[in-house]
Amino acid sequence: MRRRFYQYLFPASFYGRAILILIIPIIAIQIVLSVVFIQRHYERVTAQMTTNILRDIRFLTERLNASPAPQTVMDELSDLVDILQIDIRLPSDDLVMPEQEQVGRFDLAGREILRVLRADLSSYRTADLTRSSSTVRLWIDSRHGILEIQLPRRLVTTSNPHQLLVIVFLASVLMTLIAFQFLRLQIRPIRRLGAAAEAYGRGESVALRATGAREIRAAAHGFIDMRNRIERQRAQQKIMLSGVSHDMRTPLTRMRLILSMMPEGDDRTALEIEIADLEKRLDGFLDYTRGQAQEERQATDPLALIANLVERYLAAGHEITLTPPKKRPKPVFLHAGSIARALDNLISNALRHSNRVAVQLSVSPDWLEYCVEDDGPGIPPEDRARACEPFVRLDEARNSESGGMGLGLAIAAEAARAHGGTLGLEDSATLGGLRAVLRLPARQSL
């Protein structure tokens, strides 16, 4: 359960996880630097500056408390007051003091100023830090009444308190962008390798150059070597196919010629049956191996591909229907020969074991689906995976005496895999037999 939670929590791609590994330490460093270091340092600086200005306030208030005429003292200390930038308002009838301290919700420096005032100034009453962002107003007790004092806020706190934090943040953003670019360059060879492997699984050969880190280059070289070995094996396979096709059919032709000279009889009939069965086996083997040796992809009309096959079977007198899509599909890049053989095998396999066959083509932006349904006995669900293996015949579902070498579904499945698609076998809801679905990517460009 916990593992599933982590799978949903973290990104699925390597690039996303690498970004997460990069971002989390940067965010953690920002939080630690801003809260633990910068904010505490800023609070200490604010407390020290407030303590220094309180010395001047105490000096002025002590002089006022010592004199019976406060205005006389203010006149005498006017030059000093101007230098200290402290404005003292003597008690009067129009003096208004707030009932409680006024400070902004996010004014952390203001809260530190109030803390120092309460702790170090015994005559302190209250303060207002919200009326102006550049002024501190506070009220204190004196011998002559309550005094109102105004002073610039820059005297008790730094003018750019979070300048260091902003610099660090901007530097972190810049370094993160540089790291993203570097990470993208490192992951690009992995994506190219994955794209080349995926394309090769569809039967395409994409040019690949080994780049990136040493481990990635080693993996790319390994893939290129593997692909070259497979291509050499395919080339040898094509040579073998041409040789087998020539060498096997020549003695079969001679055997048929010899049989034609023999008198009619049971022995001749039995030999003709065996030769026909051998030719059928040879054709099935060649069809299966020919499907593995893929031809070049070309732009193909998917509707015309299936329509031509259906017309051939209709001309031969078979009961088969075709349901085209509502909108004619655009040409897609396919191995036309292998797909035609796959559909031909699916249709002939359905006709061999049923009376009616329905063919349907469905089109979506990303996929093509060829559906072949019949009213035959079908295939049990537990045997459907094994039915797609080569040279496998299911006697219970498909009568072996009716023909077939067990290669029809295998050829169709191999053609689907070569295109990056699938072959699905399921129950037919309309005819009651088997429903074979050949699902292919609708790629309109190479």
Image: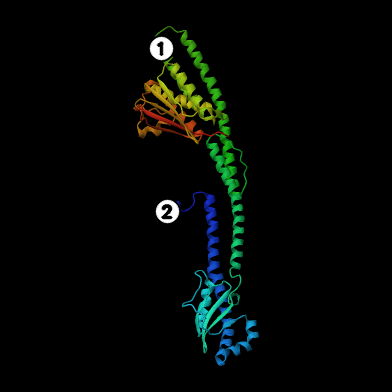
- For residue 398, which quarter of the picture? top left
Residue 359 in the image: x percent, y percent? 43, 26
Nearer to me, 199 or 372: 372
Q: Which residue is mark 2?
A: 5
Of the image marks 1 and 2, the number of the one nearer the N terminus: 2
The three-letter amino acid code for the residue at tag 2 is Phe
Nearer to me, 440 or 251: 440
Where 347 falls versus 145 (above or below)? above
Q: Which residue is mark 1?
A: 269
Classify 10 Å Cα crowding around label 2: few (below 14), some (14-19), many (20 and above): few
Secondary structure beneath dot 2 equals: helix
Residue 318 in the image: x percent, y percent? 41, 18
Q: Quadrant of the C terminus?
A: top right
Where 132 falls versus 206 (above or below)? below
The three-letter amino acid code for the residue at tag 1 is Thr
Residue at image position (50%, 74%) is 102
In space, the residues marked 1 and 2 are separated at their CA atoms by 70 Å
Of circles 1 and 2, which is in front?
2
Classify 10 Å Cα crowding around label 1: few (below 14), some (14-19), many (20 and above): few
Q: Is residue 128 visible?
A: yes
- For residue 428, which quarter of the picture? top left
Secondary structure beneath dot 1 equals: helix
Residue 198 in the image: x percent, y percent? 53, 39
